[in-house]
Amino acid sequence: MVEPILHYLIPTLMLLAFFPRKKKLILLLSPLSVIMDVDFLLRLHRWVLHSMATAVFASVAAYAVANALGVKAGKKDAGTAPALIVLFFVTSHLLLDVGSPGIPVLWPLSNSLYSIQLKFYTDPRTFSFTQDVVASVSPLEKALESQKTPYLTNTGAVSAILVGLILAARNILARRPIRR
């Protein structure tokens, strides 16, 4: 299970790295990377909001709203970039949550949780690599059994600190005059 800070940081930083010209739009839409976890407040975490139906609905809605606003501003096809960004945020959330207990990725077509757990190991004594891949399908109700979820772990805290340090260093270096 991935905590909210990583659900936010990973896709946001990936999009910013690949599409720096879309920075304002990416940051504006970035809260959508964690909006699917609002079902946690309803005690229904990993229920219907963690499905591809949500991803499709959210991206179509983003396209419609952005296109309507763009047409008013005289821009043609203003909805494509926002729709793709929203689709990336929501599907990255699904991929990050695909571990135990799983997600109802095919809801409403299926009332099952689908889970894939990947573990990669290395043995430093023999320099060998092994992996475990476990795929499972379980009833949707199993999602309700695991309500205890971390909002921050060591990985999330360290990631947030590293991102903060990188951004601080970038800002400090950007302000320095270049000496020739």
Image: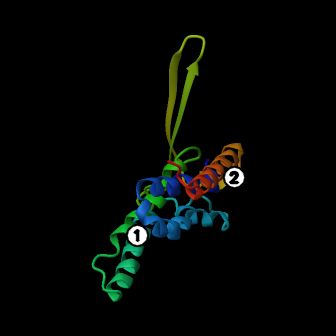
Q: Position of residue 129 (x, y in %)?
A: 51, 20
The one of 57 and 7 positioned closer to us in this rendering: 7
Disc 2: which residue = 149
Query: Is 94 positioned to the left or the right of 77 in the image?
Result: right
State the residue lying farthest toward the left: 76
Disc 1: which residue = 82
The one of 76 and 68 positioned closer to us in this rendering: 76
Query: Is 79 positioned to the left or the right of 36 in the image?
Result: left
The three-letter amino acid code for the residue at tag 1 is Pro
Neighbourhood count class around disc 1 (C-alpha, 10 Å): few under 14, some 14–19, many 20 upward: many
The three-letter amino acid code for the residue at tag 2 is Thr
Query: Is 81 positioned to the left or the right of 161 in the image?
Result: left
Q: Position of residue 45 (x, y in %)?
A: 62, 59
Q: Position of residue 72 (x, y in %)?
A: 35, 88
Q: Residue at x 41, y 64 (%)?
A: 21
Distance CA(mark 2)–CA(mark 1): 30 Å
Residue 30 visible in the shown view: yes
